[in-house]
Image (cartoon, helix red, strand yellow):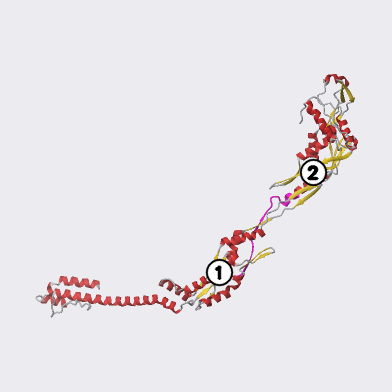
Amino acid sequence: PTRRRRRVRRYVARHQAALTPASPTLIEDVAELPSYPSRLIAPPKPDTAISARERIEMRRRQRRARLQRRFAVWRSFATTLLLCTLVLLALPYAIGLSYHERALPGVAIQGVRVSNLDPSAIAATLHAQYSDFLEQPLTITYRDQTWTPSLAELGVVFDTEATIAHALRYGQTGDPLTRLRDLATLLVGGVDLAPHLTIDEAKLQRYLLRLSQSVDHPPRDAALSVQYGRVIATPADSGRQLLPTENTLEMLAALSTLQPQQITLRTRALEPTVNNQMLAVAEQQAQALLAAPLLLKHGEREWLWDTAQIADLLEVQADHTRMEVMIDPERLAQAVNALAISFDSGSVEPRLRLDAGALQIISPGRTGWQLDQPRTTRFISETLMQAAPTTRTVRLAAEKLTPQVTPAALPTLGIADLLGEGKSSFAGSEAYRITNIKAGAARMDGVLIAPGAEFSFNTQLGEVNAENGFVQGYAVINNRTALEWGGGVCQDSTTLFRAAFWAGLPII
């Protein structure tokens, strides 16, 4: 049509002068033009002539007619659309009024349909569906222990009223578009709502913390002790620890089902630092060390250390990599020092007496022995650590002592004056005390101390037994009075101390 209008305009422009009454020839020419549709400008007839103004007015009327027809069509369409929109927007409200205080068709709560039910009916339906869960939501087990906590203990709140309100509000609240969308969902396949369940995770974890007091226990390291010559092994034991995060997640998943569930607590093993493999190695070492007694020999003299004495020397050391049974150097040194008291023969120099400024020998000197404690300690340690035969023997290391003071050397000693004196009385003492005091004094009488040498009362005294003239008597031991060899010999030591003190000798 647009192209045709353009052709008509060009035609009118070319033959406008011919459209007047004075141009019949041109009008005849116009009559010869092809015909056009009625909605276009009709060509002038041979017997009619119109002016240009009339032609323009005619076209305006035709244009207005076309616009009026088009407007009528659009107005009809808009009116229809508006009516449909109003109907759609009003439909949800009409449905809501018809289902007042009732759930719409297609509404379900976790698979249970509550369509067309009022609040009381929905509450009864929920109680029937979840009564078991509300009474006992979880059964928690661990080995032979069982716990059945309530929802309150777990920090869980099942909000029935909120669940009912949600079911009643679905499709009946919100703006019109929201309501239409909800109604469309109900129409297509319905909606399955979740019950309102509130879980306080902090309270749930506090409950797990209380359970951990019944479940958790620390690991126990393997232990080894040696008592009275016997090896006592205590095996290791793994510990257990509750896993709070994993158990919390599992309990949350179980609670979300809204059905009674049984779960087993998850734990992890805590391995001991010192395990049973380390214990087995250490136990084997201890058994080897105690396999046989230890025989100490020097010449014709012998000392036998039984397994109980050897056990007193042992020390158990353990860390995260090993457990080892060793000989405690300090304990062994103390044992060797005690051995030296009975081994050492004391002074080997002659016994002297100062009489009127002149020295005289009251007891000739003799050859003696002094235990070499460092070497003896090393020999004993090496022997014990070796593979144990039936009896282990150690040759004691000792130094031979020969007298250096002879009668001819007495004038060269320079002993001419009494430096110190100590006196104490034992008159009225019991017979056993008198015997022991005399025996102890005899062991000290006339002892010669070389320049720079150390004097030990215990070493000089030697073993307190019947062979050295001592008898049993009462003595104070650990604040108690008990029978003991050499009761009263302590008076010898205190008297000797007085003499050394008044002589100005250093006391160490």
* Contact between labelled residues 2 and 1, with CB atoms less than 8 Å apart: no
272 within the magenta span: yes
Determine whether, in the image, residue 149 is placed left or right of residue 185. Answer: right
Q: CA distance from mark 1 to mark 2?
A: 68 Å
Q: Which residue is mark 1?
A: 158
Instruction: State the residue in front, 449 or 371.
Output: 449
Q: Residues within 10 Å of mark 2 (few under 14, many from 20)?
A: some
Which residue occupies the foreground of this view, 340 or 461?
Answer: 461
Q: Earlier in the sequence, mark 1 or mark 2?
A: 1
The boundaries of the magenta stretch are 258-280
Q: Residues within 10 Å of mark 1 (few under 14, many from 20)?
A: some
Residue 455 seen: no
Q: Estimate the x, y position of residue 142 in percent, counting from the top left.
A: 67, 63
Query: Taking 243 as reference, is 406 above or below it?
Result: above
Q: From what the image shows, is residue 282 above or below residue 444?
A: below
Q: Position of residue 57 (x, y in %)?
A: 17, 75
**Name of the residue lying farthest toward the bottom:** 47
In reply to whether residue 292 is colored magenta, the answer given is no
Give the residue at mark 2.
Answer: 312
